[in-house]
Image (cartoon, helix red, strand yellow):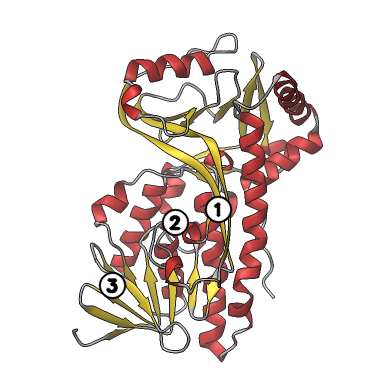
Amino acid sequence: MLSPMRTQVGIIGAGPAGLLLSHLLHLRGISSVILERRSRDYVERRVRAGVLEQGTVDTLVESGVGERLLREGLVHEGIELRYGGAGHRVAFEKLVPGRSITVYGQQEVVKDLIAARLAAGADIRFEVDDVAVHSLEDAPYITFGGERLDCDFIAGCDGFHGVSRPSVPEGVITTYEREYPFAWLGILARVAPSAEELIYAQTGRGFALHSMRSPEISRFYLQVPAGEDLDEWPDERIWAELKARLETVPGFALATGEIIEKGITPLRSFVAEPMRHERLFLAGDAAHIVPPTGAKGLNLAVADVRVLTEALTRFYADGSTALLDDYSDICLKRVWRAQHFSWWMTTLLHTFDSDDAYGRRLQTSYLDYVTASDAAATTLAENYVGLPYEVLP
């Protein structure tokens, strides 16, 4: 074992949560080291979320890493719900004035944060192995690749399959889970978007989503059975099914092009309570997973990190542990709100094999209500663009 290094906050994971936490702590004069098992190239290319809430955009811009986001991000002031042969726009500018969403890929957020951290001289260790956490009660440290990192606190930002959450003793954390009987087949295509805003399509064939990443790159998703084999979906079949689910309104034609990436993602809901054990704090996917229908995963990670940054800032300023003690309760209020919204959007728009004619008719009836009632549409809009952040005690 080499001589130990020391930092104030040891961060496991160089995704959006870990990188943003390190960046925000740096702005407050708090040191950190980031450990990541993947390569820099991998984390900068990993395609994930692409819809940023208003609060996420504001956080990135206010912290000085939003220049490219403001220049290249696609600001949207509405989404379309498409069903029953018609499109229905949910107008954010009318329902939640001054708030919108921005389409900007998670990998682009990661690139911006890595560039900012390295420019500031941050210590980011990529491709580390054998990461483990120790002595969480009083003198925590992390071991990795034959080295040791001593720290005051550990932030577990290493995702659902990371090492942070499993390091908590059995019985401390309660988990809540739901797996859905379908998955999303997602593609990136080298083709201009066929619409200016996102289209959420509900059909008898299953759900489809038309999204985008830039004026030249489109992102699409198809509902497929859980456990579906990607080899069963050649490009021709994908485009045929997207057309069948999206070309359901008069005058709409789906543009097709070269598929440059595709994959299948299972849908699940997951929450770990509490999000803190002693001096280990979980953030982002290490603590919670939501179905992507509500576009909440990355945004929840940013919300967690904002609270944790403020809690650590207060601790280092005057030794106060009050906000550290409240971290889990504060974050979980937003997490469960996002869980409900994501579940609601998923059940509203997807086809369930278990549904009979009565269930399918109920689904259409509720879609009619959402698109006809300003109150219902406002609830959708305010959750989609992101609820305001809580005023911290």
Label 1: which secondary element: strand
Report the residue marked by disc 3.
121
- Kindly report the distance in space between the C-alpha atoms of the residues bearing marks 3 and 1: 35 Å
**In front of the other: 71 or 256:** 256
Q: Residues within 10 Å of mark 2 (few under 14, many from 20)?
A: some
Q: Earlier in the sequence, mark 3 or mark 2?
A: 3
- Kindly report the distance in space between the C-alpha atoms of the residues bearing marks 2 and 1: 9 Å
Please identify the quarter of the rendering in which residue 162 is found: bottom left
Q: Is residue 215 visible?
A: no
**Callouts 2 and 1 close, C-beta under 8 Å:** yes
Give the residue drawn at x 56%, y 27%: 199
**Image x and y of residue 30, in percent:** 43, 80
What amino acid is labelled 1 in the image?
Phe
Q: Earlier in the sequence, mark 3 or mark 1?
A: 3
Report the residue marked by disc 2.
160
**In front of the other: 100 or 218:** 218
In front: mark 3 or mark 1?
1
Q: Residues within 10 Å of mark 1 (few under 14, many from 20)?
A: some
**Image x and y of residue 229, in percent:** 36, 29
In front: mark 3 or mark 2?
2
Q: Earlier in the sequence, mark 2 or mark 1?
A: 2
Label 3: which secondary element: loop
Give the residue drawn at x 26%, y 86%: 4
- Kindly report the distance in space between the C-alpha atoms of the residues bearing marks 3 and 2: 29 Å
Give the residue drawn at x 75%, y 25%: 362
Pick the quarter of the image with the C terminus.
Answer: bottom right
Report the residue marked by disc 1.
270
